[in-house]
Image: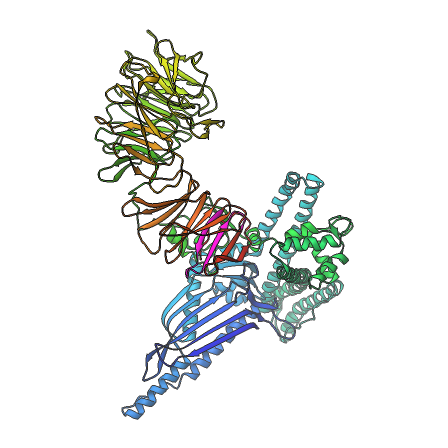
Amino acid sequence: VAKGAALRCDELAVGPVAWRAAASIADAACVDLTPPPRCRWLKIFAHDANEPRETDAAMLRLDVNAVRMDPVARSTELRLRAALLPVHLRLDQHALRFFQSFASSREREDQEGGSGGSRSSTSDDEATVDAIDVDAATARSAFFQLAEIRVPSVRIDYVPRDVDVAALRAGNLGEALNLVPFGGVVVRLQPVTARGVCGWSKLSELAVRSWLEHVASTQAHKFASGLAPVRSACNVGTATKALVTTPLEFRRAGRRGGAWRGAAHGAAAFVKAVSREALGLGVTVAAATTAVVGGVEDAVIPRQSPREEMPEPNTLREGVRQAAATLGRGLKKAATAVKDGPVRVRGLGGDGPAVMASAVRSAPAAAVAPVAALAKKTGRLSVKEEEAIDAAYRHNLAVGNRLQELEEQMRLALKARRQLHCAERELLMNAFARVDPDKTRVVSVERFVEVWKTFGVDVTDREARAAFNKYGQTRDGSLPYPVFTEALLVGKARLVGMSSEVRRGAFPLNRPAEEYQFHGKILYPQCRKGVFTPSGWDGSPARRSCKAPDATMELTWVHGYARDCLANNLFYTATGEIVYFTAALGIVYDKDAHSQRFFTGHDDDVKCLAMSNARDLCASGQVGKYPYVCVWDPATCEEKKKLRHPAVRGIAAVGFCRDAKLLASVGMDNNHTIFVWDWRAGKCAHEVKGHTDVPPKVYGIAFDPFGPDPTAFLSYGVNHIKWWSKPEGSKTYAEESGKFAPAAKKHAVMSAAWLPSGRCVTGTPDGAIAVWDSRERKCVRVVRAHAAGPQVTREDGPPTHHGVRCLRLRADHKTLLSAGADGHVISWDVSSGDLKEGSVLGATPVKRRSGSDTPNPPVFRGLDCAPGSDVFVAGTHRSEVWEIDDTPRVLIHGHSGDLYGVAWNPAAPTEFATASEGEHVHVWCAASRKLQRAVALGSKARCVGYSPDGGELAVGCKNGGVHVLDAKSLIRLKWMKTLGEYVTDVKFSPDGELLAAASADQRIDVYERKGGYKKIATCRGHSATVSHLDW
C-alpha cells in the first residue's frame, strides 16, 4: 500500500543524459490481507514511528539518470540514488516464508525470461539484430554505473510459529531462531555504494549482503538484547528504578502529596510494568513451548490425517472449555497409543517380549500427546489475552494519533490568524479569556469546543476529553487553559529534544562505526542547548572531525593593546623595540620593520608586566586558579623561568629589583599576598600579607633603584601606600604604611616612581602628583599636574576619575614624565631631588588620532622613555600605542571597547572591518597591517557584515539599531531601528537583495535593499538569543 506517490520522467534529446526519472512515496506499508490474518501483525512493513520524521518527508525517494554510452546503439547505463526513511519490520514465520517463496518464484521467472539468450551471426544485418537483442536484454537487466542506497535503520520484531525438530537435529542452527521470539532490535545500516552492477536482483543481493555483513560484525549483540526474557528484565529494572526515583521527584518538585503520592505513582507503574512483562513473557514461553512440543509430537506420533484446527476462543470461558476438550483428546490419543500397539502385535502372533517392546515404544507418544494438547491450548489462551491488551493499546495509540493530528490543525489555525503584534499564544489566551468572565483560568469541555469553533477547528466531545486527559484537569473535570496553551505551542525542536537520545561531548577518535551513527541530541560546552543529528546522518562527518585538520594557523599580527591594566604595561627594550601585552600574549613590536614577535607561554589573560633595569628581561603575570609568572627574554621570546603560585586567583602586579636578582609579585587573593622570589632558583624567598581587602586593591609594586637596600620596595593601591624592608637582623619583611594627612586626603594611589633623593612621587585620581618623604613615610605636598579626566568605574566598583596613571623617570635621572587623562605628557625637572609646581619643563599635547571624529583627548595607561633619546611611547584607553617625538604618530591601532564583530570584504581579499562597543567601526588592510579608515557611529556596535559586491557595510548595534554605511567613505546610507534588543548578527543574502538582522529578542528581521531597506519579514520561533545566522 502506497500513499502520496509521485513520478516525474524527462527525456532529453541531446547531452550525456538520455532520460532521468524521480519518484517519491510519502508513505508505504506491507499489509496482510488473508481472510483471517495469518500473520501476527496487520502491518508487516511500515515507517518506524519511534524515529523522528521531518514534516512532509517522503518515505522513499528514488532518482535515476540514464547515461548515453553509445549514441548509435542507443545503449544506456543507469545512475541510481535511493533513500528510505527508518523502517519497522514486523515478521512472523508465515510472513517470512511468504517473502522467501515470493523471491524464489521471481528469480525463476527472471531465469526463464532470460533463457533465450542472444544469437551470434557474421552478417551485418544479423549483427544489427543481435545488437537489438542485447539492448532488450539490457532493458530487462539494467546496468548500473553507480548506485547509492541509504537506509538509516531497521527495527525488527520476529515471532516464530513452529520449530522443525528434524532440521534442528540435523544441525541447522538457523532453526534455533524459531525457539524464542525477539523484538525492538534496531540495527543501523551503512550506506551502500555499488559500481558496475548488472540487474536489479544483483543490486539487491549486493546491498543485502553488505548490510548483513556489517550488522553481523558490529551489531550482533543487539539481537541478544532483543530477546523477550532479556528485554523483560530490562523493562522491569527500569520500573524498579522509577519505584525509587518517583517519590524523590515529587518531593523535589513540591507536587501535591509529596513523596507519599510519588511512592503511590511509582508503585502503580511498577506493578503495571511487572504484570505486562510477566504476561508477555508467559505468552513468549507458551508459544515457544507449543512450537517445540508440537514438533516433538509430529516426530513421535505418526499422523494419519491433517491436524485439526479449532476456532480461536472469543472469551476466557470458551478458551478454558476448548482447552479441556483438547486435553481430553490428548489423553484419548495417549490411551489409544498405549492400547493399539501391543494388541496389534499380539494379534499378529507376537510373543510376550514383542508385546512388551511395543508397549515401551508407545510410551513416548502417550506422554507427549496430552502435554502437546495442553501446551497448545495454554499458548493460544495466552496469546489471546495478550492480543486483547494489544488491541486496547492500539486503540489508545489511534486516539493519540488523532489527537496529534488535531493539535496540528489547531496550530495551523492559530498561525493563519496571528498578526504582527499578536502572536499565537496571545490569540489563544484571549479566546479562552472571553469564555472565562470570572477569570478562573479553567474551561469546561463545552467551552473548549466553543473556543476552537471560533478558529474553524471542529473538536468532538470525545477528542476534547482526550485532550483534557493528556494535559491534565482539575477535580471537577476542567482544563487549566494556560497549561494547555503553553504545551500546545511549544516548539517542535524542543519536543524532539525531550524524546531523543542524548549524547554528551564530542565523538572520540577510533571508535566502532555504530558509535558514530548516533541519532539524537548532542550536548557540548560550546552550544548551550545542544544540536541534533540531521536526517540521513551516517557518522562520516563525525569520524572526519575527530582528526586534526591538515591546515595549520600561524599568528602574524595582533591589533590593539591591553588598555584595562592597573599599572604601567608598556616598555622599551635595550634595542629600541616596544614590549606590551594583550590577552594571553606578550608582544615585542619592531617599529622599523613593522613586525611583531610573540611570547606564548601563558594559558590565560596576562594582567601585569615588568621590565628589568637593564631592559633585557620581562616578567608577566596571569590570572587563573593557580596562576604563574613567566620570566622571558624579549629578544628571543624564550621563557627563562616559570614561577607557579598557590591559589591566589591571579597576579595583580610584578616588579624586578635593581639587579634583577629578585622578583616580587602580588596575588589577587583577599590578602593581596606579596611573594618575593629568587626567580633564577625558582624559589619563593618571602611571603607576606600585602593588604587585606576585596581584590583588586593593590595596583603596583616598585623596588627602590637608588637606596642602600636593593631589596626594599613599595606597594600602592586603593587608599594606601606601603614601604617594605627587612630590618637589621630580621629574615622577613616589615611594612610601614604612608600617612596622607595633613598634606592630602586619603586617596587611591594610581602610580608611583622613585627619585634619586629617596623621595617618591605618586599619581592621584584628580590629576595631581603627591610627593612623599620615604624616611618619614608621609606625604609632604601635592602638586597640580593634569586634569582629572572622565569619570570611570574602579575595578572594585566605586566611581572615580582616571587621574595620573603614568610616572616615568628618564635615564638621566633628572627628568620625570607624567601622563594623565587630559591628552598631555608633562616633563618635570627633578634634578634637585624634589618636585614642585615650578618644576614644569614643558607639556606635550597628543593630538587626536587621524580619522577620528571624537573630541575627547586620549587617556594614558602606559608610558616609557626611549633609552638615550627624548622620544617616549604611550598607551591609551583606545587600545592605541603612540610614539611621541617631533611628529607624534600611532604605531598600533585598536578599539576602545569590547570587540564583537568582524567581517571580510568579499570584493577585496585583504580588507576586513571590525565593530566594537567603543562606538567605532574600523576598516583594516591585512596586507599592510594598518588601519585604513574609521568612523564613529554614536552607538555601541555588536556585529558587522559586507554586501556581496563589497559596496555597503551593515553594522548592528547594542540598542537594536542597524546602520548601513558606504564601504569606501563610511558615510551612513540608512539607519533602521526595528529590534528591541541588541543585534547579534547581520548578513546580506548571496544576491545582495536582502539583509537579515538577528537579535537577542529571539527574532530575525529581513530588509529589502532595493526598497530602501524596508522591513519585509520577521522570523520568530527561537527560544533563546539568536547568536548567528547565515543564508
Which x, y percent locates residue 811?
24, 22
Compared to residue 852, the image places residue 138 above or below, namely: below
Q: Quadrant of residue 93?
A: bottom right
Which x, y percent locates residue 525?
46, 43
Q: Residue at x 42, y 49 (%)?
A: 944
Which x, y percent locates residue 14?
35, 80
The answer to whether any part of residue 620 appears in the image is no
Which x, y percent locates residue 586?
31, 34
Instruction: Locate residue 792 relative to residue 752 in the image: left or right.
Output: right
Is 124 or 93 nearer to us in this picture? 124
Q: Quadrant of residue 427?
A: bottom right
- Does the magenta run of residues contain 988? yes
- The quadrant of the image that shows the N terminus is bottom right
Residue stretch rendered in magenta on the structure: 983-1002
Instruction: Locate residue 277 relative to residue 48 in the image: left or right.
Output: right
- Does the magenta run of residues contain 898? no
